[in-house]
Amino acid sequence: MSEYNFSQIEKKWQRYWEENQTFKANETNGKPKYYALDMFPYPSGAGLHVGHPLGYIASDIVSRYKRLKGFNVLHPMGFDSFGLPAEQYAIQTGQHPAITTEQNIARYVEQLKNIGFSFDWEREVRTSDPNYYKWTQWIFKQLFNSYYNYSSDKAESIDKLIAEFEANGNATINAACDEDTPAFTAEDWKAMNEQQQAELLLKYRLTYVAEAVVNWCPALGTVLANDEVVGGVSERGGYPVERKKMRQWMMRITAYAERLLQGLDTIDWPEPVKEMQRNWISKSVGAELDFAIEGDGHIKVFTTRIDTIFGATFVVLAPEHDLVAEITTDAQRAEVEKYVNVAKNRSERERMTDVKTVSGVFTGAYAINPISEERVPIWIADYVLAGYGTGAVMAVPGHDSRDYAFARHFNLPIKQVVEGGNIEEEAYAAKEGKIINSGFLNGLDVKDAIKAGIAKTEELGVGKGRVQYRMRDAVFSRQRYWGEPVPVYFKDGIPQLLKDEELPLELPKIDAYLPTETGEPPLGRAVDWKYEDQYEYELSTMPGWAGSSWYWYRYMDPQNNTEFAAKDKIEYWRNVDLYIGGSEHATGHLLYSRFWNKFMFDLGLVVEEEPFKKLINQGMIQGRSNFVYRINGTNKYVSYGLKNQYETTQLHVDVNIVENDILDLEAFKAWRPENANAEFVLEDGKYHVGVEIEKMSKSKYNVVNPDDLVEKMGADTLRMYEMFLGPLEQFKPWNTNGMDGVHKFLKKYWKLFHDNNGNFIVSEEQPTAEELKTLHKTIKKVEEDIERFSFNTSVATFMICVNELTQLKTNKRAILEPLTKVLAPYAPHITEEIWQQLGYSESISYAGFPQWKEEYLVENTFEYPVSVNGKTRHKLSFATDTPREEIEKAVLADEQVIRFFDGKTPKKVIIVPNKIINVVV
Ligand code: ANZ
């Protein structure tokens, strides 16, 4: 083979790897383990573009490097294959989503294999495969059968809770439960009928059905999770989302709020992701206290600033608050009802972020401040959210901006109780300073006043300290077809679990992927689909995040039919050492996965409390769009540099018919029928296109397909070029123009081994110090780079190395063989080929990573003959610029030299720089 024939080489080795199962992960050979995981993709119809493989290439380099370093590597790939796009397509075409999904996966696999990833394909998982979702359903069952015990701080069996209820009621129980859970005794419990007991248990179960205010998206016909709603519209499709009360399956993630928060300190994740999770969970330490309602009852408020209690001049309830109807006076009723109706349709997000509109209504009722004993009016306003804290606030307009705006608008009293600042400007934010105008709190600073305030409310029996998390329980129902069926049927309205041996509950066949006429989810269309022919199954399916919240365990043991994964495999692989994926999953997938993992840990099903030890977010690869400029009212296009001389319209042009920013005119004419007669105004005979960086998307004609590039220059070039684009985490534009440089590098590497006639010319000669230095500094740098996930710098190092070796005309095995091992993780195909030419019959994948040696790195050394009394006895190397004193010290300390002193003390050391050393004794 004379030329570097990449396509032949790459196909050959991809076949070899597959046939020999080179990357089959092994857990039984005593090596240490390393688990490198990519966030598995949703197989979309569009296939992969060059942005998708970026993270996969990085994790593949690490995986290959770790194998060379003697690790057992688990590096799997699979598909998150339930989801909306396949279903939307099914709605339009009537085709079963399983078919589209299958086709898309086949295309993904082909594309991935083209790039030479070292995945253990035998471990592939698909969340939509019944053999997989059987276990998603099984985990759901465990959640249903568990509650969270705050006393032991873990999830425990619901049977234990029931036993407790039977013995003592719930008075002694410290468990995560719904806000409205009543207190009851053992007798009360026993007096309840089955239905009542079941309803009560739902208030404790880690997954439960409940009435919940949800994000309902009429256009998509489904409920959406908070992280699927962006700016009041659906993340997918941008359809309007409204608030609606519906009976839904929920996940009691709030039980884990504190552990989800604390766990962040134990994992090596990007700080912004941790911060997003902290904000999402959002812990507030404060107090709840009761304001007695004049007449009867009381309002519980949640505050983080009980120190400002003497400044509370009114109370505000969320419009949805249960007490509203009760306390509103007749005079105010019409106005209140009108307001409640309007507020209902504003999303929580909107209500929280809209600080401009001040609105609210007086209920006509009054409450008594429990500390100052002042009489204060009770209002309702939509800036108070029903789902947070207690849904009611003590308003302190002197120190809270919302309350301030409200008080100004409605002319309510404003009182300053923390010293310093100007109320109208910044005083409301005062978190420091002495308390004033506040009775027994006067003179304290904020922190002490909070303590004193809480102590006082406890003493009076009107309140207590309270920790509040902003995170809500997660809605788990989707009114969709293409998701996991919930393994539940209903008997007299009570949810019952299917038995383990009845799993998986498979998706039934239906005639159309739409809601039923009566508004039931698509599963309502299934004919004769009943449990034991009589009980209704749950008709909603699980959300997209169910299948992805545990998949890394399935890779450990993907074919297991009796367990989600065998315990010994879990004990071996434990958790993911390196997880690479996009930052868009910060508060969705990455939070839910941590939640399920902790739950499974509590049950003893898994052995690590955190699933992903190290996380890296790869930056997005943006598109580099190209533009042409049509002269208005004509079919004439003007080159970029001349466009300002005309009135033009800028239009996207397909980047695949542009090379080095020059438009291929014939291809342009053929691109679209209306271009057939296009005319051009050229610059120096060429059409220069305009360039802009945008998101990579079909509609912008800037999508670059990796398959095309692999065909043109090979997978090794693509892999190295993607890394060369810049630091992994950085957002960066794609630019095919630079790829050629990397391709030339690989050709140059190839040439080190071959003469112009393609003969393999590697020699067995001894390397020179200079060659060794080039090699060893490359080994050292690449090892350090991979260990700190800096891949672009390695590519630059390889280029320098190959240039230096080319200049030195190196063809020695002693240099080129170790270099080939170092390059193998980056360019696996070409290095396998060379490895074979070097005479090896096994894959390079386990050949070992070379060890660099400090001695070869020393800058320009000289090897001195060392004499004792004129007789040469030894040789010692020193860098040419080593100071005389240092050489002398080293010589006198060297055992090999001292031997010849015959026990005498040396009189003198003569050093002639870069010539000789002579010791006189
Ligand atoms: C009095 C006060 C005085 C407050 C002051 C703040 C500043 P975080 O930190 O986010 O937990 N609040 C309580 N429940 C609310 C609800 N359901 N909807 C809207 N606001 C609510 O915020 C806690 C503070 O937000 C609480 O402390 C309460 O106002 C308000 F100078 O009470 B504060």
Image: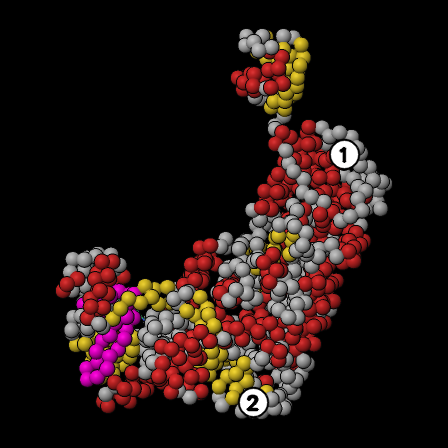
N-term mark: 2 or 1: 2
> Three-letter amino acid code at disc 2?
Tyr
Percent of width and height locating residue 649: 59, 66
Quadrant assignment, res 431:
bottom left
In the image, is residue 896 above or below residue 423?
above
Magenta segment? 286-312
Percent of width and height locating residue 856: 64, 30
Is 734 situated left or right of 273 in this image? right
Is 895 situated left or right of 182 in this image? right
Q: Which residue is mark 2?
A: 535
Question: Is 520 or 383 nearer to us in this picture?
Answer: 520
Q: Is residue 294 magenta?
A: yes
Seen at 39% across and 71% down, the residue is: 175
Alpha carbon of mark 2 to alpha carbon of mark 1: how far? 77 Å
Seen at 36% across and 78% down, the residue is: 169
> Three-letter amino acid code at disc 1?
Lys
Q: Residues within 10 Å of mark 1 (few under 14, many from 20)?
A: many
Is 771 situated left or right of 148 in this image? right
Seen at 26% across and 65% down, the residue is: 305
Quarter of the picture for ligand 1? Answer: bottom left
Q: Residues within 10 Å of mark 2 (few under 14, many from 20)?
A: some
Q: Check residue 812 in the rendering and tell me which mark sits there, or answer none.
A: 1
Percent of width and height locating residue 238: 52, 74
**Secondary structure under the numbered disc 1 in the rendered image:** loop
Question: Is 600 or 260 nearer to us in this picture?
Answer: 600
Percent of width and height locating residue 278: 42, 61
Seen at 28% across and 89% down, the residue is: 334
Dot 2 and dot 1 residues touching (CB under 8 Å): no
**Secondary structure under the numbered disc 2 in the rendered image:** strand
Is 675 situated left or right of 789 in this image? right
Res. 350 visible in picture: no
